[in-house]
Amino acid sequence: MAGIGADDEARFVLIDEIDPDAVAARLRGARPGGNFKPAPFSPLGSPRGITRLAMRGLAGTQKIEPTAIPLPEGAPYGRVEIDTDNCTICLSCVSACPAGALQDNPDAPQLLFREDACLQCGICVATCPEKVISLVPQFNLADSAMNAELVIEDEPFHCTGCGKPFGSSRSIERVIDKLSGHSMFSGERQTDMLKMCEDCRVEAMFDKDDRLMDVGERRKPRTTDDYLN
């Protein structure tokens, strides 16, 4: 409330009375003090939407420009800060976000964020494999908080087999870099599989002329007769 210019000391009055009539008289005679002005609004919509309407109305009566009001840690309102230099747009955070604050674009490798939907639950922070997300508790009164803003975008990576776009260039390059030292991806052919879509990858694994997963002829199983003889 202090962020919208309301006088904290004038908002609460302690009534220490035992007699119900005395309490009623105090309530009838109570008047708002300080420079706080009430703001009428229609309580329609979700609880978060009603809170936003009330805060914007009060800010308007105090002639406060719509801005972001800092909140203490643990508040259920705020935004996320993302290190775009190290984000690979893997979209793990989008799948984990329970409120839909983090969104993707089905037509392009993009990460979007809608602030008014963010609950500051921290699931995205725990889910992010690159650890590039942090929480910023605040109450943003600006209209921009209600729109999904573009956080980061990248070029789609095209399958080397069929040319179909899948994933982002950043994510595929990071996977190749992470697995480059693994024994199963030490060869160029195995690494090339990471550059294929799911369909082409399966075809490459079981190709008759060049079976990447072929380990040679299996040894004949030994039986009891082999040991007795």
Image (tube, grey):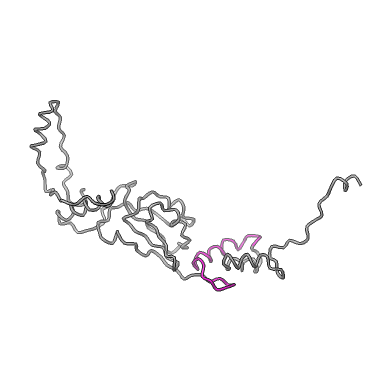
Residue nearest the observer in this picture, 46 or 121: 46
Residue nearest the viewer, comparing 125 with 181: 125
Residue 170 picture location, percent across and down: 49, 66
Q: Residue 28 colored magenta?
A: no
The residue shown at (9%, 36%) is: 28
Tell me if 56 is positioned left or right of 228 in this view: left
Looking at this view, name the residue that lies furthest to the right: 229
Residue occupying the point 42% across, 50% down: 123
Point out the residue furthest to the top here: 18
Q: Residue at x 39, y 58 (%)?
A: 102
Specify the quadrant of the image occupied by residue 188: bottom right
Residue 102 in the figure: left or right of residue 226: left
Place of residue 194 in the rendered image (x, y in percent of width and height, measured from the top left): 59, 65
In the rendered image, residue 169 lying in the magenta stretch gets the answer yes
Query: Number of numbered discs present?
Result: 0
Q: Which residues are magenta?
A: 158-184
